[in-house]
């Protein structure tokens, strides 16, 4: 889960971070990471808007997915995950606009999904880009807490700690699609990228943030990978 690595990195840079979860049991966990926990369901649009307004967030980092801890059960979660990419993203964008947040970043994937899962990814990306946001296409995550703790997944891929570091830097990027992948994957994909696709390979983009921001981070309540 990227958020577990990302929150401490943001706090260490001086950002005020609010972490959203729909689970009361995770509030203390988020507090321990350094975030101000917000217990809210992304499908309750009015409560979500009020929660985001209350944070005073200038940036929203949308990391919501609905996936199981056991990779073997992913097929059972296809519909729920597609819903969160569609309805969850729309609700978060509406809340972000009402709150006056200036930046919106949303998690996507750097490989092609079939069927409705793929259609939901396309819809998420179009919705975010139309609103002037940033799409973060992560490679398959590997490392502690992912589906690939002890082996490497197929390409495209990215180590989870590096993925979190790239996400911190993405807060400074203009609207567009960012590929957060390994250096090898970036080299392979570069020739076919469009003008809106920018590669964030491991080890790149070492610039500093311009300054701390209040951030709201809707985090997944039950996922290991995007």
Image (tube, rainbow, N blue to C red):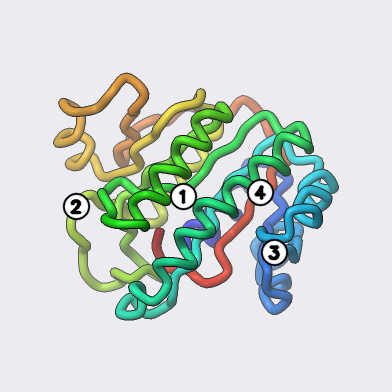
Residue that numbered label 2 is attached to: 155
Q: Which of pointers 3 and 1 lies earlier in the amino acid sequence? A: 3
Pick the residue in front: 204 or 55.
Answer: 55
Q: Is residue 156 left or right of residue 73?
A: left
Secondary structure beneath label 1:
helix
Q: Position of residue 62 (x, y in %)?
A: 57, 49
Badge 4 or badge 2: first in the primary sequence: 4
What's the distance in space between the residues labelled 4 and 1, CA to CA?
Answer: 24 Å
Q: Quadrant of residue 79?
A: bottom left
Sooner in the amino-acid sequence: mark 3 or mark 4:
3
Q: CA distance from mark 3 to mark 1?
A: 24 Å
Residue appearing at x 35%, y 79% in the figure: 73
CA separation, marks 2 and 1?
18 Å
Tell me, yes or no, if residue 166 can be seen here: no
Q: Which of the marked residues, 3 or 2, is nearer the chain's N terminus?
A: 3
| Crowd class of label 1 (few under 14; some 14 to 19; many from 20; radius 10 Å) | many
Q: Which mark is residue 91?
A: 4
| Residue at image mark 3 | 41
Between discs 4 and 1, the one toward the N terminus: 4
Residue named by callout 1: 164
Residue 104 x, y percent position in the rendering: 59, 36
82 w.r.t. 193: above or below: below
């Amino acid at each position: 889960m990227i958020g577990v690595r990302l929150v401490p990195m943001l706090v260490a840079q001086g950002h005020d971070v609010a972490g959203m979860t729909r689970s009361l049991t995770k509030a203390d966990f988020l507090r321990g990471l350094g975030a101000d926990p917000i217990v809210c369901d992304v499908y309750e649009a009015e409560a979500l808007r009020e929660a985001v307004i209350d944070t005073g967030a200038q940036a929203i980092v949308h990391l919501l997915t609905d996936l199981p801890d056991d990779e073997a059960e992913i097929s059972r979660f296809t519909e729920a995950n597609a819903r969160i990419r569609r309805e969850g993203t729309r609700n978060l964008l509406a809340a972000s606009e009402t709150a006056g947040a200036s930046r919106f970043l949303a998690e996507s994937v750097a490989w092609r999904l079939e069927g409705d899962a793929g259609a939901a990814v396309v819809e998420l990306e179009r919705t975010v880009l139309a609103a002037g946001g940033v799409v973060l296409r992560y490679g398959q995550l590997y490392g502690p807490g992912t589906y690939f703790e002890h082996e490497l997944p197929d390409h495209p891929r990215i180590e989870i700690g590096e993925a979190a570091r790239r996400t911190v830097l993405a807060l400074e990027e203009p609207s567009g699609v960012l590929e957060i992948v390994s250096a090898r994957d970036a080299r392979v994909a570069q020739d076919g990228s469009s003008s809106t696709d920018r590669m964030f390979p491991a080890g790149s983009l070492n610039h500093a943030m311009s300054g701390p921001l209040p951030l709201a981070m809707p985090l997944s309540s039950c996922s290991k990978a995007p």
